[in-house]
Amino acid sequence: MYGHCIDNLIDAGARILGRTLVECCSDAEASAAARAAMSAWGSMDMGSAPVIVDLFAGSANLLHHVSHHAGVRGLGFETTREVYDATARNLRVLGLDVELLPRSFDVSGPINAGVYLLDPPWGSAFDGVDLDVSNTIPPIPRLLRSLGSAQRGDSHSIVVVKMPSVVSGAAMSAVARVASIVDLVYSGVDGSRESAFLIVKVSAEQAKASPL
């Protein structure tokens, strides 16, 4: 995690909560998502480095890798106090260039064009195989539409949506109604498919044309 082996993390004084260890992206997964996200951003020819924002930061490992790949400081939001305290401490002792705030991200906008990371709690939306994106907390299509609606002017943003290793046609269709799918990246250790990331583009124009 954070690009360090477990011994280095322990030596540095980092502490990983059990629930965070289960839910977080591995370095391999996060690196793959970072490469795909920045490739998508580069294809939009925005001419500047993006803001990198994680709406549900958790361990902030994904945020760290994406912001590091982009060469900018990442901004994360985490509302569970125990998780926030542990992650904020880890970021501090490891000297990572990530700012973490103990509150929710305001999706009402206006927001800057950038790369937004999206992994809301799955809860009962995940049956062990498939993820019902309309029943995450909050629903992923609603979040995507809100991010699109909040864009300044005619700007666009890239959103990285963490998915399970199996991505159903229903999930793809639900996302495609509110965002433009750019890529689907599978990742895991040693080439295994442990998880997937949907890379999508959102805009105010598409959000307006795609009411939920």
Image: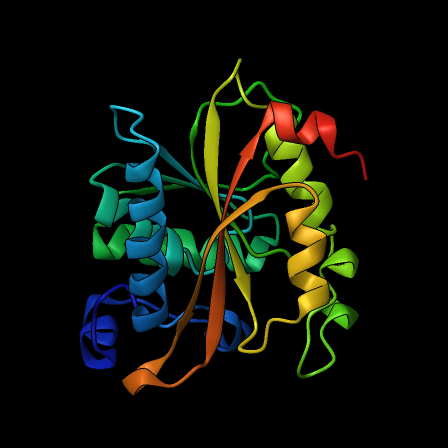
Q: Hey, which quadrant is residue 6 in on the image? A: bottom left
- The image position of residue 45, as x and y in percent, is 29, 29
Q: Nearer the viewer, residue 191 or 3?
A: 191
Q: In this view, does 190 lie above or below 160?
A: below
- The image position of residue 70, as x and y in percent, is 24, 42
Task: Give the left or right position of residue 8, taking residue 74 as reference.
Answer: left
Q: Which residue sits at x=68%, y=36%? A: 145
Taking the view exactly as shown, the residue that stands out farthest to the top is: 153
Task: Give the left or right position of residue 134, taking residue 193 as reference.
Answer: right
Q: Which residue sits at x=53%, y=77%? A: 165
How many marks can you see?
Answer: 0
Task: Give the left or right position of residue 132, taking residue 155 as reference.
Answer: right
Q: Which residue sits at x=62%, y=23%? A: 205
Q: Is residue 121 at all visible to an observer of this figure?
A: no
Task: Give the left or right position of residue 135, taking residue 21 as reference.
Answer: right
Q: Which residue sits at x=73%, y=65%? A: 170
Q: Which of 58 and 143 is in front in this view?
A: 143
On-image quarter of the C terminus: top right
- The image position of residue 69, as x and y in percent, is 23, 49
Q: Is residue 39 at all visible to an observer of this figure?
A: yes
> What is the image's colouring?
rainbow
- The image position of residue 142, as x and y in percent, is 73, 43
Q: Which of 169 and 101 is in front in this view?
A: 169
Q: Nearer the viewer, residue 210 or 139?
A: 210
On-image quarter of the N terminus: bottom left
